[in-house]
């Protein structure tokens, strides 16, 4: 086999690996986990009730989902574009024995149907929040709560804010 086959094959493998490990280069948002104090506060601000459905958009390692299911008895669904983080989140969920109540999907949040969510949590970027506003208006049921860490929903009036922790609660009218 010619040396070019090896070079070409290696190049393709390197590209795949790069895509797999660094999806944020393509999607623009790195993984930065929310600390657990804020995670609990987010879920408290949203007054998550047992049996309610919590969606975390860009769920990282699944910590918000696990906390929502374990401490608030919610049904939790996470959507994450980075396959490594989906893998990590699924392992954490199995270790926490919460597989019956928590699921993580390898999915772009812009393609997720939000109509079943009672609560949406997110820690993204301002331009992503801006893009999601219309989707929230179209798909979220009336009364659904959204809690965003750091970034706001520009066209929405927050029902509650925690300026120290930089958390914002919104309710879909
Ligand atoms: C700042 S981290 C927050 C992780 C988690 N929600 C937390 O609070 O610990 C943002 C996450 O969103 C994910 N993400 C970015 N764009 C996304 C998209 N379009 N669809 C799904 N996930 C996305 C990133 O891979 C990253 O894991």
Image (cartoon, grey):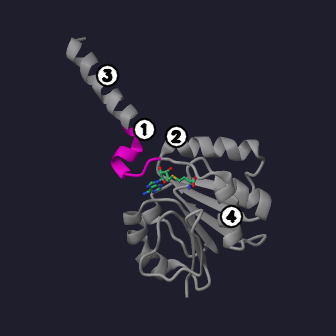
**How many neighbours does mark 1 have within 10 angstroms: few (below 14), some (14-19), or many (20 or more)?**
few
**How many neighbours does mark 2 have within 10 angstroms: few (below 14), some (14-19), or many (20 or more)?**
some
Question: In this image, 133 relative to 38: left or right?
Answer: left
Mark 4 lies on a secondary structure that is helix
The residue segment tinted magenta is: 19-30
**Among numbered discs 2 and 1, the one appearing first in the sequence:** 1
Q: Is residue 101 visible?
A: no
Task: Identify the disc placed on residue 84.
Answer: 2
Q: Position of residue 157 (x, y in %)?
A: 50, 83
Which of label 3 and label 1 is nearer to you?
A: 1
**How many neighbours does mark 4 have within 10 angstroms: few (below 14), some (14-19), or many (20 or more)?**
some
Label 2–label 1 contact, CB within 8 A: yes
Residue at x 76%, y 70% (from the top left corner): 51
Mark 1 highlights which residue?
Answer: 20
Mark 4 highlights which residue?
Answer: 41
Q: Position of residue 164 (x, y in %)?
A: 59, 64
Spatial CA distance of label 2 from label 1 is: 7 Å
Q: Position of residue 145 (x, y in %)?
A: 61, 76
Spatial CA distance of label 3 from label 2 is: 21 Å
Decide if ligand 1 comes within 8 Å of the CB at mark 4.
no
Tell me if residue 132 comes above or below residue 100 in the rendering.
below
Verify whether residue 160 appears in magenta. Answer: no
Label 3–label 2 contact, CB within 8 A: no
Query: Majority secondary structure of the magenta segment?
Result: helix
Decide if ligand 1 comes within 8 Å of the CB at mark 2.
no
Task: Identify the disc placed on residue 10.
Answer: 3
Q: 52 or 3: nearer the eye?
A: 52
**Among numbered discs 3 and 4, the one appearing first in the sequence:** 3
Label 3–label 4 contact, CB within 8 A: no
């Amino acid at each position: 086999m010619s040396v070019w086959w090896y070079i070409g094959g290696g190049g393709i493998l390197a590209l795949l690996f790069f895509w797999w490990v660094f999806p944020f280069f393509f999607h623009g948002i790195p993984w930065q986990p929310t600390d657990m104090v804020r995670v609990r506060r987010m879920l408290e601000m949203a007054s998550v009730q047992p049996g309610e459905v919590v969606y975390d958009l860009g769920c990282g390692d699944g910590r918000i989902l696990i906390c929502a299911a374990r401490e608030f008895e919610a049904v939790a669904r996470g959507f994450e574009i980075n396959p490594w983080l989906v893998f990590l989140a699924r392992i954490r969920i199995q270790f926490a024995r919460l597989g019956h109540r928590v699921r993580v999907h390898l999915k772009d949040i812009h393609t997720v149907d939000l109509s079943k969510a009672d609560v949406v949590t997110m820690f993204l970027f301002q331009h992503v929040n801006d893009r999601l506003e219309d989707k929230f208006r179209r798909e979220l049921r009336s009364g659904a709560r959204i809690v965003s860490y750091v970034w706001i929903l520009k066209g929405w009036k927050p029902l509650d804010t925690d300026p120290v922790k930089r958390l914002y609660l919104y309710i879909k009218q």
